Amino acid sequence: MWNVTDKKSNVIIKEDIMIEARSLAQRYDLVGGMFVKAMERGEFDNLEGAGKPLNLEENPYEPADLRMVHKILKDNGFAPYWIELGKEIDALKAKFSKEVDFFSKYIRMVYSEQPNSRAIRDFEKREKNFFRQSRKRLVEISKKVLDYNLQCPVSNLSRRNFDLDDEMNKLIKNTEKLIEDLKGSF
């Protein structure tokens, strides 16, 4: 019974590969056509290792003289610089998001009642400081994203950077809208 199921799945996989190969043949006539003809003749049947999982432990593109070094680093929890940088960017973004949430809660607290003039002055000082710190955080994140994209070996893993002024304008507008909404509740 197991062999029948295995054979059925191999047939389905082979059919999927044939469809993909025909698609390649249409895009790249010479190579794709040769590939389809070889498959139809069965030249890819019974290849060594067919049906067995791939060994992904070794990177065939890794320089041989660095394999041992990379293995030691990996075994001890170290990652390439760009991966560590990606983790750092994610942590900075999460921290920035928490700071924005915290400041929004502060705004709600200040405007939960009709604030007096002293509370407004204190709030305005904190607001200026918040925007100044937010700009610094966004500059730091932007620089790290740029560094990450320069270090990342594969372009499709790059991260989308943002326009600092646009992000600051969104933050300011969202803050102003929240304040206006809270003032309107009086």
Image (cartoon, grey):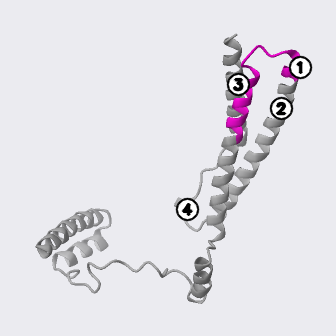
Mark earlier in primary sequence (1, 4): 1
Circle 2: residue type: Arg
Mark earlier in primary sequence (2, 3): 3
Sort mark 4 into few (<14), some (14-19) or many (20+) by Cα contacts within 10 Å. few
Residue beneath label 2, please?
Answer: 126
| Quarter placement of the N terminus | bottom left
**Residue at 54% of width from left, 60% of height from top?**
157
By secondary structure, the bulk of the magenta-drawn segment is best described as helix
Which callout, 2 or 3, points to the residue nearer the camera? 3
The answer to whether mark 1 and mark 4 are in CB contact below 8 A is no
| Quarter placement of the C terminus | top right
- Residue 8 in the image: x percent, y percent? 14, 69
Q: In this view, does 41 lie above or below 180?
A: below
The answer to whether mark 3 and mark 4 are in CB contact below 8 A is no
- Label 4 secondary element: helix
Disc sitting over residue 130 in the figure: none
The answer to whether mark 2 and mark 1 are in CB contact below 8 A is no
